[in-house]
Image (spheres, rainbow, N blue to C red):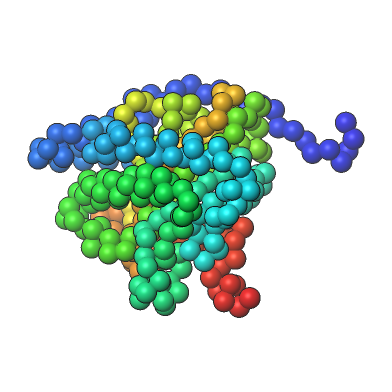
Amino acid sequence: MSSTEPTIDPQIAVPRRASATEMPILDLGDWLAGGPIEPLVAQFKAACTNTGFLYVRNHGIPRAAVDAVFDATRRYFSLSMEERLKDKIDERFRRGFMPYGVTQHPGHKPDLKESYELGVDLPLTDPDVQAGLPLHGPNRWPADKPWLKEAAEAYFGHTVALGKNLLRIFATALEQPEDFFLQWCRKPMVQSRLFHYPPQSSPTALELGAAAHTDYGMLTILAQDPIGGLELRTRSGEWVAAPYIEDTLVINLGDMVKVWTNDSYVSNPHRVANRTGRERFSIPTFFNLDYATPVACLPQFQSKDNPPRHAPVKSGDYLVKRFSEVQKYKTPAQLLAA
Ligand SMILES: O=C(O)CCC(=O)C(=O)O
Ligand SMILES: [Fe+2]
C-alpha cells in the first residue's frame, strides 16, 4: 500500500437488535380512539430518558399511504440520473432531488444516499416566503410525474398529523398543557426526505449510508422498508440495530429537545449501514416548530444547582445553522449576496 492511499477503517461490526427497553413499541390506538393519554406518557418518558428512540404502532397513518409513498419513491429512483437532475434541489427552498455527495458529516466521506425533499408547501405570495424566511417556500415537483407529488404530499399530510399528536404526548410528559407545542405549529418547519441508499458491502466507520449523527430538531418520524440498516447508540455507547417492524414507525428525538429539558431527554447518535446487498428506501419526516419558536430550558429542569446547560435558541435559526454544517449549500444570505 502506498502512503498516499487512505487508511480504510475495519468493517464495522453487525450489532445486536435493540431490546424492548432500549426501543419500546408504543401503541397509540387506544388513545387515538379516545382513551387516556397517561399510559403513553409514562412509556414515552421512559424511552426519551433512555435512548430517545421508540416505535409507534396504530399511529393513524393508513398502511396504503405508506405503501404508496414507498412505491413512488422506488419508481422515482429507478429513473435515469438525467431525468432526476431535471428537478435538482433548489438552494433557497431546499425542495427536490438531492444527489449523492451533498450531505457530508465532518470527518466522514459523503453519505451514500440520495433523496427527494419536500416540506410545508407555501405559495410564493406567502408573506414569510416574500420576506425570505429561510426554508419557507413551495414544494418542487416534476410536472410529468404527478404520481410522486400525489403520494408524497398525501403521506406528508398524515405525518404532520401524527407529529402534532406526538407533540401532545410530549407536552404532557413535560408537565405542560397538552397543546403547549401546538401554539408554535402555525407554519411548522416539517420536512420529509424520500431516501434511496445503494447497497454497501463493507460499511466502514468513515463511509456509511448515513454517518453517525444526531437529529437537530424536535421529533423525527421514520418509515423504513423491510431492508433495515438503522443503528443507534445506547447510553452505554453500544451500537444496536433498530430493525423494521411491520406497521410501525420509528420515532426519535432531536437536539432541540435537550435545550427544553436540560439534557434530561436525549437525542442519541444513529447511523445507517446497508449491508444487505439490496437497495434500501426510507422516509424520515423531521418535525419542527415555527421558525420563531423560543426554545429554552423549561422551569422544572433547572435549579440553582442545575442551571441551563444550553443557551436559549430560536428554532429556525438553530436548524439553519445545523443544516449548513452538513449540507453543502449556500445560505440564503450567501445567495442574496451572490
Ligand atoms: O434512513 C434512515 O433510516 C435514517 C436517516 C436519518 O437518520 C436521517 O436522515 O437523519
Ligand atoms: Fe437521523
Q: Between residues 314 and 124, which one lies in front from this camera angle? A: 124
**Residue 264 shows in the view:** no
Q: In this view, does 25 lie above or below 52?
A: above
Q: Percent position (x, y) of residue 106?
A: 63, 50
- Name the image quarter holding the N terminus: top right
Query: Based on the displayed image, in which of its 4 quarters is residue 277 positioned?
Result: top right
Outermost residue toward the front? 144
**Residue depicted at 44% across the width and 26% down the height:** 226
Q: Percent position (x, y) of residue 275?
A: 58, 25
Total count of labels: 0
Outermost residue toward the right? 2
Q: Is residue 338 above or below residue 203?
A: below
- Name the image quarter holding the C terminus: bottom right
**Residue depicted at 77% across the width and 36% down the height:** 7
**Residue 71 shows in the view:** yes
**Residue depicted at 42% across the width and 77% down the height:** 131
Q: Between residues 80 and 336, which one lies in front from this camera angle? A: 80
Q: Percent position (x, y) of residue 85?
A: 60, 52
Q: Percent position (x, y) of residue 57?
A: 27, 32
Q: Between residues 303 and 35, which one lies in front from this camera angle? A: 35
Query: Based on the displayed image, in which of its 4 quarters is residue 187 positioned?
Result: bottom left
**Residue depicted at 35% across the width and 40% down the height:** 251
